[in-house]
Image (spheres, rainbow, N blue to C red):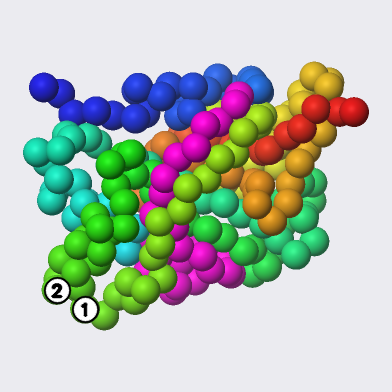
Amino acid sequence: MAAIDFKKTDKALYQPPTAPVIIDVLPMTFIAIDGSGDPNTSESYAEAIEILYGLSYAIKMANKTVMEYVVPPLEGLWSTPDDSLENTAPLNKDQLEWTALIRQPDFVGETELAAAKQALAKKKPKLNLDWARLQTITEGLCVQVMHIGSYDDEPATIKQMLAFATDSGYLIDLNDERRHHEIYIADPRKTAPEKLRTVLRYPIKERE
């Protein structure tokens, strides 16, 4: 039996068109790590990514009899103190507050995470595994699009998303719980910047 690949079974989440669409996102469970600063230079961000992948693969390998699946792509929730992610001005990345995420199958709970932490700690004892937690996120109504190209070119795509949401009768609904969301479909280490594929997602609400 072929391994389940969420990018294929949940195409609406991971393969949106390059024109904005409205989507209702149901609850999902993630391994999550919080941090702040420029992800291009932050040592804590690099360690967070190493932890997320390490734990995700440890869970996958330990539960092959439960479910065969492909580890989902890296995701990120982003915000800034002044909510500047909502506009198209140049972004001061040092001010970024982030939550790095990797989705987990429904069977994963605290027991599976604890076992994965124990296994990973034996291989990489220097990693701060206390950073990682399970988090269930219900995003609900959102506008999203597939951005093709460099991360630095996202503002133009975000502008299109905001305009589409407004024209469709919605308001952007960013807050502490509902944040700018990115899903990294293409690996930046192996993909030219102009060919990167990133799902951009913003929470919305109906205009009253």
Query: Does dot 2 land on a helix, a strand or a loop?
Result: helix
Which residue corresponds to mark 2? 122
> What residue type is disc 2 on?
Lys
Query: Does dot 1 land on a helix, a strand or a loop?
Result: loop
Magenta includes 34? yes
The local crowd at label 1, few if under 14, some if 14 to 19, many if 20 or more residues have their Cα within 10 Å, is few
Q: Is residue 160 left or right of residue 197?
A: right
> What residue type is disc 1 on?
Pro
The local crowd at label 2, few if under 14, some if 14 to 19, many if 20 or more residues have their Cα within 10 Å, is few
Residue drawn at x 60%, y 24% as measured from the top left: 23
Which residue corresponds to mark 1? 125
Residue at the right extreme, as displayed: 208
| Residue 163, position as x, y percentages in the image | 80, 28
Stretch of the chain drawn in magenta:
23-49
| Residue 44, position as x, y percentages in the image | 45, 72
Quarter of image, res 31: bottom left
